[in-house]
Image: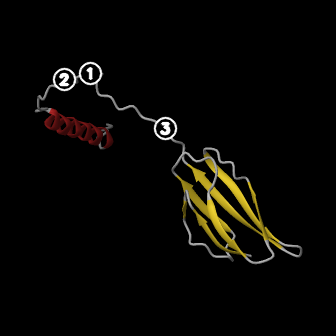
């Protein structure tokens, strides 16, 4: 069995427990493979599959085995894509905004709403006089 596992170039969300077989690891660097330290029982060997990492989600499988039994640990490694951002403020356009207050906006909205309600009630409750 795998006694201890430490990830050197990533953040493991859970503390290692030999009975838990699924882990999530976040990597924020440009490494192309997972670097780790481990301890296993005597007489066991370790096999690692899928340790070539691409951007995005990767699955790395650690298999601890001997002649009679084996156990696999699944590490889901999320490697963030690194991007270089050029922040230059040399090219900009000035935005000219007139700071005129909108004096008549609120009264206009009130008058329009009042007229709409008045017309609605006039059509709804109109008296039909039939002689």
Q: Tag 2: Cα neighbours inside 10 Å, few (<14), some, or many (≥20)?
A: few
Label for residue 93? 1
Q: Quadrant of residue 108?
A: top left
Q: Which residue is mark 2?
A: 96
Q: Rounded to the nearest whole Å, what is the CA distance between mark 3 and mark 2?
A: 33 Å
Q: Foreground mark, 3 or 1?
A: 3
Residue 104 is situated, as x and y percent measured from the top left of the image, at: 12, 32
First of labels 3, 1 by sequence position: 3
Q: Rounded to the nearest whole Å, what is the CA distance between mark 3 and mark 1?
A: 26 Å
Which one is nearer the viewer's eye here, 51 or 122? 51
Please report the residue visible at 77 percent of the width from the left and 78 percent of the height from the top: 42
Left or right? Give the position of 66 relative to 87.
right
Q: Foreground mark, 3 or 2?
A: 3
Residue lying farthest to the right in this orientation: 67
Element on which disc 3 rests: loop
Q: Rounded to the nearest whole Å, what is the CA distance between mark 1 and mark 2?
A: 10 Å
Q: Tag 3: Cα neighbours inside 10 Å, few (<14), some, or many (≥20)?
A: few
């Amino acid at each position: 069995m795998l006694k201890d596992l430490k990830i050197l170039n990533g953040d493991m969300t859970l503390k290692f427990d030999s009975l838990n077989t699924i882990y999530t690891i976040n990597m924020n660097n440009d490494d192309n493979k997972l670097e780790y330290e481990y301890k296993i029982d005597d007489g066991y060997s370790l096999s690692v599959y899928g340790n070539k990492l691409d951007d995005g989600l990767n699955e790395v499988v650690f298999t601890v085995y001997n002649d009679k039994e084996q156990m696999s640990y699944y590490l889901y490694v999320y490697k963030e894509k690194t991007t270089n951002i050029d922040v230059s403020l040399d090219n900009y356009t000035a935005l000219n905004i007139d700071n005129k207050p909108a004096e008549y906006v609120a009264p206009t909205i009130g008058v329009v709403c009042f007229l709409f309600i008045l017309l609605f009630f006039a059509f709804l409750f109109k008296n039909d006089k039939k002689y």
